[in-house]
Image: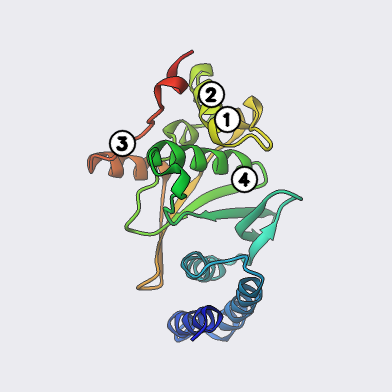
Amino acid sequence: MSNREKFDRDLTILLSRLTFDAGPEVENKLNMLKDWLIKLQKENVVKINHSVMELVCAKHLIQKGYEVQIEYPLNEILTCDLYGIKGLGNLIVEIETGFIPPENALAPLTYTTARLASKIIRYSSFAGKFALGVPPHYILPFPSTLAKPPRNRSDQEIAQIKKLCDKYYQKPPVTIEEIRNARIQEIYIIDVDRGKVQEIDPDAYLKRAMQKGIVYDYFPPEVKEQ
């Protein structure tokens, strides 16, 4: 069986789980999103681990009244994972699976913190509400500063995040003003096995993670130096 056939098979199995009690309207919308993902997979744009999380999250959002698109272009550079519209408001969800590129194997925590910070900063400027989606087995090490209201951030915190993001992302670099105004409003814990999504406030998520001994706000020495 080819990778393309396996991708199609896995999405078909997942859709049968997600739609058996969802009603015809939700089923039709999810099938349209599935077909879109299959098209993108043929173009080598998406991978299965990421796509199944997108579909589970899409069902959750559709049932909450959102019109949902997957792999939605925001501009000529950025494409978001899920884009939802409800009334006059919009929502962006970026999915995180925890993948670390081989070239960052010696600094996985630093790299992941920078990647998450960059995502929050870049994508939240396009959204009335921004969320990160994560599997239950992975803890997101995003900077706690970005969960604060913008008015509560110090210049030092903003400068540290700027240096951290610049270490990995400079095409284009994030700006001080973008960091100052960025914010994450929600975490979606996406359980593919059960086809469920749990929403949690970022502050509560951080507190829960710290109780388990997770390291937050890790900045390497070259970033801490002012």
Residue placed under numbered mark 4 in the picture: 123
Secondary structure of the residue carrying tag 1 is helix
**Spatial CA span between label 4 and label 2:** 17 Å
**Could you tell me the amino acid type at mark 3?**
Val
Task: Locate residue 107: give its quadrant.
Answer: top left
Count of marks overlaid on the render: 4
> Mark 3 vs mark 1: which is more N-terminal?
1
Task: Tell me the residue that label 2 is attached to.
Answer: 158
Give the crowd class for mark 3: few <14, some 14-19, many >=20 residues within 10 Å: few
Q: Residue at x 64, y 75 (%)?
A: 42
* Label 4 close to label 1 by CB (< 8 Å): no
- 108 relative position to 159: left or right: left
Q: Earlier in the sequence, mark 3 or mark 4?
A: 4
- Of badges 3 and 4, nearer the viewer stands 3
Residue sitting at the far front: 103
Q: Residue under circle 3?
A: 215
Q: CA distance from mark 4 to mark 1?
A: 16 Å
Which residue is under mark 1?
166
